Amino acid sequence: MKIMRRICALLSVLCAPLLLLSSTTKKPKAAAKTQYLAYVGTYTTKTDSKGIYAYRYDAITGNFSSLGIAAESADPSFVAVHSNGKFLYAVNEAGKSSMVSAFSLEPKTGKLTLLNQLPALGEDPCYISFDKTGKYVLVANYSSGSIPVFPILPDGRLGEHTALIQHSGTLGPNKERQEAPHAHWIETSRDNRFALAADLGMDEVLVYKFNAVKGTLAPNAPPFAKLHAGSGPRHIAFRPDGKFLYVISELSSSVTTFRYNARAGTLRELQTVTTLPKEFSGRNDTAEIAVHSNGRFLYASNRGHDSIAVFAIDHAKGTLTFVSRVPTGGKEPRHFAIDPSGNYLFAENQLSNNIVVFKIDLATGSLNPTGQVIEVPSPVDLTFVAAE
């Protein structure tokens, strides 16, 4: 027995370092995603486009390789991939014949198969997004100034709408562009309790209480935040922490900073800055806006000046300081996208039928063209999904 006790004691001494090493060694982190599929929504009317185009994307090199037409579809101007990576949804911007389409996604080939289409319940839908549960899609109908909500069924198809809001109220002073409400963007807040919509015709960011169980919308109190008359708010970008949001206004070529009260769903205006140089006097319509995932920089596109304006974000105040403007290498940058790695920005030049790739300087936020240009007819929207 004494011999056995001595052996056990010796083994415990010898094994102690191994046990300590085992308990303190951390498991290796999962490798970061580097391979993606990318989908480009386009305009097909009076262009050479056939619908939605697919690409393979390497986030390390920033290189795209074409997979061709993912699905033939009429004017799929804005597309969004569900967080489960199985489905893609598109708005078909076609006047009175406008639709919302659901597709299944084949991850190996990138091909899309139509599941179903439903009427958009308004004219010219120009934006589509998901609520944070992934159970609903929200759509902005531009020409009708309306907001429908559709449930996503278990098989990915769209169900009958659960909400339909018609915007109405005081219009802006621009008689040509603000003759009626024009819903241009809608998304839910980080906590999914509110849905915010930008209306170009009314110079308002409308705020709705969102019921994630029923998929319904109800006006918040107060129901909107007003922008300067004639601004024409188009798109909105939240800072990642949700404390501030930024509204790009198409008609005034400006970006307005708001502090966002997440508890009440209210906005307080802090600052408005121009996206254009002082000496520029030509026609310009701003389009897309995005905040980098690091929360330090904001990007805004100019159509006419054909550039991306870069701003630094003050961490404490949320306000913007101009950094630079970079030519997009084409005409009418209707949209741009920052890739999931945060290293590259893709400027979609609608009228020159190309997407120009820029490397993002993570220290300064500045953009440098890589020399890669992707030819695609009438690009309007670009989105990514991790590849298998």
Image: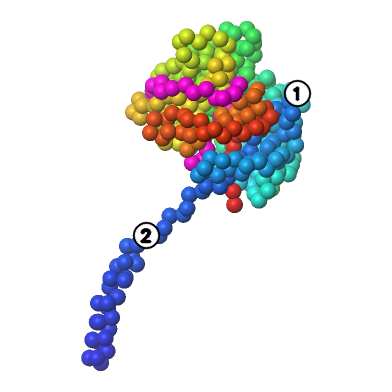
User: What segment carries the magenta color?
Assistant: 318-342
Write down the quadrant of residue 37 in the picture.
Answer: top right
Q: Quadrant of the N terminus?
A: bottom left
Residue 123 in the image: x percent, y percent?
Answer: 71, 23
Residue 88 at what x, y percent from top left? 65, 41
Measure how far apart labels 1 and 2 are at the Cα level: 58 Å
In the image, residue 332 lies in the stretch drawn in magenta: yes
Judge whether 35 appears above or below 28 on screen.
Answer: above
Kind of residue indicated by mark 2: Lys
Q: What label does residue 372 carry, if any?
A: none
- Tell me the residue that label 1 is attached to: 46
In the picture shown, does residue 2 fall above or below 153? Answer: below
Mark 1 vs 2, N-terminal side:
2
Residue drawn at 41 percent across, 58 percent down: 28
Residue 373's place in the image compared with 334, above or below, is below
Quadrant assignment, res 201: top right
Look at 53% across and 40% down and name the residue there. 62
Q: Sort mark 2 into few (<14), some (14-19) or many (20+) by Cα contacts within 10 Å.
A: few
Q: Which quadrant of the view contains residue 69?
A: top right
* Residue 286 in sight: no
